Image (cartoon, coloured by chain):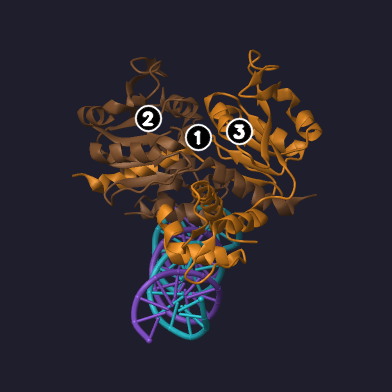
Chain colours: A orange, B brown, C cyan, D purple
Amino acid sequence: MLPAKTIERLSQYRRTLLQILAKGKLHIFSHELAEFHNITAVQVRRDIMLIGYSGQLRKGYNVKKLIDAIGKTIDSKNDQNIAIIGIGNLGKAITSYFNGKRSNLKIIAAFDRNPAKVGKVISGVKCYHINDLVDIIKKENISIGIITTPPDNVIDIAEKLTMSGIKGILNFTTTPIKISQNICLEEYDMITSIEKLTYFIKDKNP
Amino acid sequence: MLPAKTIERLSQYRRTLLQILAKGKLHIFSHELAEFHNITAVQVRRDIMLIGYSGQLRKGYNVKKLIDAIGKTIDSKNDQNIAIIGIGNLGKAITSYFNGKRSNLKIIAAFDRNPAKVGKVISGVKCYHINDLVDIIKKENISIGIITTPPDNVIDIAEKLTMSGIKGILNFTTTPIKISQNICLEEYDMITSIEKLTYFIKDKNP
DNA sequence: TAGATTGTTAATCGATTAACAATC
DNA sequence: TAGATTGTTAATCGATTAACAATC
């Protein structure tokens, strides 16, 4: 099991590498990859070391092979089905990000309690009523739920997700949730990000 | 200057405390606040210690006063004007989050290159053309820019933001950006979050 | 009083960076 | 060859947690 920070960086390296490959560049040095991501070359080399891939002295890393090596480490063998809970602006934004991306992560269901949305196809994804969440997640073999609802519904949704046997939850609301040990949880809070930024800006007054 | 992690938690404590206050609870113990956020009571006490606020033995923290103390530490004295660059689904989601929230952070301008949007008011915010970004940011005294455009426009936008004299950038695209030392930068990448989650889910197969 | 709680220091844990041997 | 680069260990830095004195 690799450190979470390493996994994050590997995911980002891969995206950069794919772009670089598209430009026809076949090899890349650790310091080049580092510069793209505003980090040090040592860190890049260490991350790559951890996945057991090796570059060549004076030639760098083979872009295509490195992409494959990263994939072998961080991707799951089988496809992962994902559900979006709350298909408002944020839910649509995330769903659209995924659309058209070749990947083994697929958003295959949306849930909402707005009757105007239930039954429709939104951003390319079928929308179900929140009350059907447990059934659909089981039936469609969905392993990840992304919560993008208003903050007040979150506790109830977290409970339903737990009952459905989901494996991972990504919570984009401002309400922190508590779940059982065997579900992976990742929370991201935009308001906090912005407040953090303003704190560190204070000293940068001209 | 407090650690970034502490600032993040303080921002989140405050949100919880406001809800608790709204319910009429006037005091809270460190272990109660900790439970809301899935962390330890020691960490809560340490964070609060760092901002120089004290609770009372056997009584806990005065909720109202703690909220004020957090505000004194993390809020800026004057209002901060914010711009959203790219007013698609994600831009609208973030703008709506802020709408109606009493706060000294205000999104007062949006930028887009879609002529159908320019000149309109979207999610309560006036939308300008991206070409006017530098001028408007200077004129309206905007200190933070939030980038929510498609990834290919990002390099150009980062340059424009730098020219405009912006103090902080929050980048929600998948393209990492490089900026001068005196601009605060915070990047968040949803795709990476989801890939990280799938990595840690692997071992949770039933 | 005893038990619960705060505030704070010291120890531990984890992540980054420095240093450097190997070598093309 | 000399300089550039990788791979890896050791040192450093920062963040969390354990331990515990103080006291209501």
Picture disc at residue A100: 3
* Residue at image coords 40%, 48%: B7
How far is the residue under mark 1 from the one under mark 2? 31 Å
Counting from the top left corner in percent of width and height, residue A204 is at 24, 47
- Left or right? Give the position of A79 relative to A123: right
Three-letter residue code for mark 3: Gly
Kind of element beneath mark 1: helix
Kind of element beneath mark 3: loop
- Indicate which label's residue lies in the foreground, 1 or 2: 2
Counting from the top left corner in percent of width and height, residue A84 is at 64, 31
Find the residue positioned furthest to the top. A116
| Image quadrant occupied by the C terminus of chain A | top left
* Residue at image coords 40%, 52%: B4
Kind of element beneath mark 2: strand
Instruction: Tell me if residue A17 comes above or below residue A80 in the rendering.
Output: below
- Left or right? Give the position of B3 relative to B159: right
Picture disc at residue B84: 2
Three-letter residue code for mark 1: Ile
Three-letter residue code for mark 2: Ile
- Indicate which label's residue lies in the foreground, 3 or 1: 3
Question: Residue B147 versus residue D21: which sits nearer the camera?
Answer: B147
Counting from the top left corner in percent of width and height, residue B170 is at 39, 40
* Residue at image coords 31%, 54%: B1
Task: Looking at the image, tell me whether mark 1 or mark 2 is earlier in sequence order.
Answer: 1
Counting from the top left corner in percent of width and height, residue A5 is at 53, 56
| Image quadrant occupied by the N terminus of chain A | bottom right
The reply to whether residue B123 is in sight is yes
Q: Are marks 3 and 2 in contact (CB under 8 Å)?
A: no
* Pointer 3 chain: A
Instruction: Tell me if residue D18 comes above or below residue A189 in the rendering.
Output: below
